[in-house]
Image (cartoon, rainbow, N blue to C red):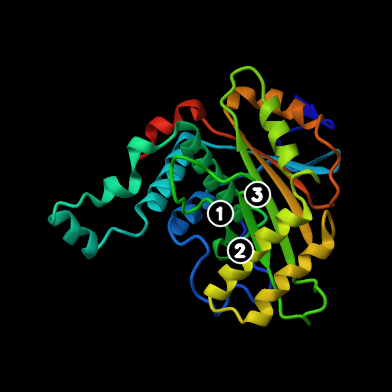
Amino acid sequence: MRIRGTPLKATAREWRPHRISGSAVGGPYTGPVIPHGADELIELAEGCLLTQQHVIKGWNVDAWYMTVEQVDLAIDAYAAVLAGGANGSVRALLDAEGIDVESLLVDPDHARESITRADVAELIAAASLIADPGHSPDDMYMPNIPMMSRRKSDSGIDILVLSLGEAPEDELSVLDHLSFISVKHSVDEDSAQSVRWKLANSLSDSELTAAYAMTQLRVLNGRLRERGIAPHIAERVYMFIRHLPSSEHLTLVAVAVVHPDLADNLIHQVESLPTADGPADNFRMVFVPDLRTLHTRCP
């Protein structure tokens, strides 16, 4: 299928790390927002090749056709998240005492197949955002990573990406930007309609309300303060509420994760999306080999 006369798999972008100069988030502050699996995510991002963008109904549409080897890297990242940093002398000590640290952390008996796939899909989406537009893992907040339970996943926005400068408290500067990212996957065999609908709904005005956004900003404020960012800077995250639902300071990103045999159908589904409000809003398609059985390969 062709979009605006150009093959979807036209050209691939090279990975290009990018940081917004002068951002108060990151830099001298330590402690990544993704405490486990960040190194594996970066390795996965280094191999991410996204197709040329196309604009459809205001959405900047691109795609990542993953290889089997890249899926293996995503599973490695998921395993690192589940391991929770327990891979040194303390784990050896507990194992020697008969405490099965790995089993307790991974908790395979209570893992739901759909949640496992969703968790890996979120990590894949995060890696793609590291690759393009070049976000740092240190600027990402993922509510489900690390997850408290493999039995359930919180609904709503899956990833927040924040760049925050040190402008006066009463305004946002060109350095200040917040992205809301929703990640959905589908194992349907005939149509990608459900994943398109779920993404459109999660980023709609009825779901992404001011009240919901404020709860996310409240948690984000707390995370920033935990990282040592000054309270008067962390408080500035609440300024983004002025700019809902769209502005130059906000970007909405929808990431659809499906099996490659639904590629043509998903491309067709993009035409049924509501018109995007922001000039940088992005609809990203990720095609994952053997997605329907991905959970069987995970810890």
Which circle's residue, 1 or 3, is located before the other in the chain?
1
Q: Are marks 2 and 1 in contact (CB under 8 Å)?
A: yes
Q: Position of residue 214 (x, y in %)?
A: 71, 61
Find numbered disc 1 in the image and state the secondary structure of the residue it sits on.
loop
Residue drawn at point x = 72 percent, y = 57 percent: 213
Instruction: Please name the residue shown 82% across and 76% down the image.
Output: 171
User: In which quadrant will I find the N terminus?
Assistant: top right
Q: Which mark is residue 157?
A: 3
| Distance (Cα) linking label 1 and label 3 | 8 Å
Question: Which quarter of the picture shows residue 85?
Answer: bottom left
Q: Is residue 123 depicted above or below 230 in this figure?
A: above
Q: Residue furthest top?
A: 190
Q: Position of residue 249 (x, y in %)?
A: 79, 63
Quadrant in which the C terminus appears = top left
Task: Tell me if residue 180 comes above or below residue 188 in the rendering.
Answer: below
Instruction: Tell me the element at label 2.
Output: helix
Residue at horizontal 86%, vertical 48%? 277
Marked residue nearer the N-terminal end (2 or 1) = 1
Position of residue 81 in the picture relative to residue 285 (left or right): left
Residue 22 placement (x, y as % from top left) = 68, 77
Q: Tell me if residue 23 can be seen.
A: no
What amino acid does circle 3 point to?
A: Ile
Disc 3 crowd, CA 10 A, few/some/many (<14, 14-19, 20+) = many
Local crowd size for mark 2, using a 10 Å CA cut-off: few (<14), some (14–19), many (≥20): few
Residue designated by label 1:
143
Residue picked out by circle 2: 219
- The answer for how far apart the CA atoms under marks 3 and 2 are is 13 Å
Amino acid found under the numbered disc labelled 2: Val
The image quadrant of residue 4 is top right
Amino acid at pointer 1: Pro
